[in-house]
Amino acid sequence: MANYWDLIHRVLREADILLIVLDARMISQTRNLEIEDKVTKTGKPFIYVINKADLIDPVTAKAYKRNIPHSVFISAKNHQGTSHLREKIQIYAARAKLDAVKVGVLGYPNVGKSSIINALSGRNAAPVSTISGYTRGLRNVRATSKIVLLDTPGVIPYMEKDDMKHAIIGTIDHSREKDPDIVAMFLMEEFPNLLEKYYGVPFNIDKSITLESIAMKRKLIAKKGIADIQRAARMVLKDWQTGKIIRE
């Protein structure tokens, strides 16, 4: 992790503009305040890029836009909002009187930094995976004749040990989560009726019963016909991390 931070510091030095990438479903949880503090201290212009905007409803997106300055909402997956982001980068470059501009892309693992780079460049220049930590080193990707993007590995704050948060935002991959049932029940608590609606099961105050219902609905059965709650919970976490579950 220390080596990853060395790369971040290098980007902070080399970049003319910085993009701070957040997950639209979990904006506050994916804000890396340590990175934001370092960005602010550079005095360089920055843009909050709220990715995965296709996973929230338009009303929620509109409310967020009013409250988050210097932000652009995009869906890198659907190539929505990328032209607006490119225009905003070019405006900053023009203000700084730069013929060519280097743009650093920063954020937690799994917020979609590489997908944004591919959307801006119009090609699969940066390898993409739903597995967190897939980007290992620093990549320079030319988006246009005047824009070079610096792709960085995702990092978490030095002292942050919040395993629940890391599972929710995808820093801990669903396949490696030790307690998927606890994470799934936390999601139910955080987003009431979201999972029930997605999987078509009734709401229940007892969230373990909801997981049983999901398991039975998806035919995830353990020995003796018992609902396999652990498999159901891991499926829920996978569907959440890979963007199948849309926040409404």
Image (cartoon, grey):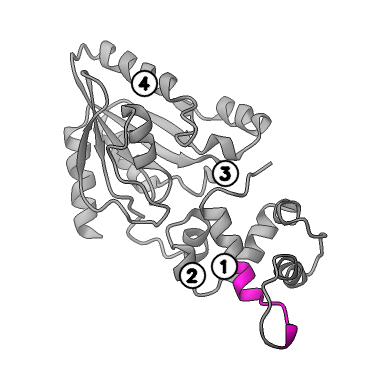
Circle 3/circle 1 CB separation < 8 Å: no
Where is 46 relative to 220, above or below? above
N-term-proximal mark, 3 vs 2: 3
Alpha-carbon span between mark 3 and mark 4: 23 Å
Q: Which amino acid, by three-letter code, is at mark 2?
A: Glu
Which of these two is toward me, 174 or 227?
227
Alpha-carbon span between mark 4 and mark 1: 37 Å
Residue 66 shown left or right of residue 21 in the figure: right
Tag in front: 3 or 1: 1
Q: Residue at x 33, y 50 (%)?
A: 154
**x, y (%) of residue 45?**
31, 25
The magenta-colored residue range is 224-233
Circle 4/circle 2 CB separation < 8 Å: no
Residue 151 shown left or right of residue 185 in the figure: left
Residue 25 shows up from this direction: yes
N-term-proximal mark, 3 vs 4: 3
Secondary-structure class at tag 3: helix
Residue 164 shown left or right of residue 192 in the figure: left
Q: Which mark is residue 86?
A: 4
Residue at the disc numbered 2: 177
